[in-house]
């Protein structure tokens, strides 16, 4: 009786052990999933690095364009100042010419 219970319990333990162990097919599936996950993580990292590189290039382009715009704005301001000065000089010359004309008319 004790032997038969012992044999039955050994068989049950053996069966449970075999059921609990992963098969080589299951291990291969887990390894394949792990490889896929790793590949996806590598792709995501590469995409993030590419996006960072593109952002840096865009920032550099934007900075260069901003500098060009600042130079153009300074040139435009200088041109506007020169135009205002030329207009004032023209008005002064016109006033002098008008004054000379009036004095010559009085004679």
Image (cartoon, helix red, strand yellow):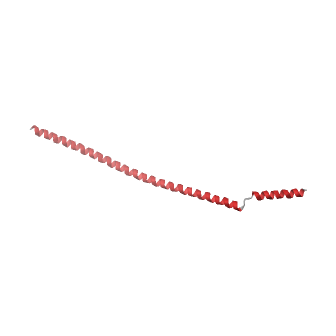
Q: How many marks?
A: 0
**Residue lying at 76% horizontally and 57% vertically, measured from the top left:** 19
For the residue pair 78 and 53, the one nearer the viewer reads as 53
Residue 17 left/right relative to 32: right
Please state the horizontal and vertical placement of residue 52, each as a whole percent of the image. Answer: 50, 54
For the residue pair 84 and 40, the one nearer the viewer reads as 40
- Quarter the C terminus occupies: top left
**Residue lying at 42% horizontally and 51% vertically, measured from the top left:** 63
Question: Residue 61: which quarter of the image?
Answer: bottom left
Residue 107 left/right relative to 10: left
**Residue lying at 17% horizontally and 41% vertically, measured from the top left:** 96
The residue lying furthest to the right in this view is 1
- Quarter the N terminus occupies: bottom right
Residue 58 left/right relative to 102: right
Look at the picture and state if 107 lies above or below 45. Answer: above
**Residue lying at 43% horizontally and 52% vertically, measured from the top left:** 62
Please state the horizontal and vertical placement of residue 79, each as a whole percent of the image. Answer: 29, 48
Please state the horizontal and vertical placement of residue 102, each as a whole percent of the image. Answer: 13, 38
Question: Residue 29: which quarter of the image?
Answer: bottom right
Please state the horizontal and vertical placement of residue 53, each as a whole percent of the image. Answer: 49, 56
For the residue pair 70 and 31, the one nearer the viewer reads as 31
């Amino acid at each position: 009786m004790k032997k038969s219970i012992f044999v039955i319990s050994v068989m049950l333990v053996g069966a449970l052990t075999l059921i609990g162990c992963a098969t080589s097919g299951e291990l291969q599936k887990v390894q394949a999933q792990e490889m896929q996950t790793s590949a996806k993580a590598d792709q995501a990292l590469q995409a993030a690095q590419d996006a960072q590189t593109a952002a840096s290039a865009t920032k550099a382009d934007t900075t260069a364009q901003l500098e060009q715009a600042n130079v153009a704005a300074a040139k435009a301001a200088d041109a506007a100042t020169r135009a205002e000065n030329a207009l004032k000089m023209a008005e002064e010359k016109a006033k002098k010419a008008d004054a000379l004309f009036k004095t010559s008319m009085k004679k």
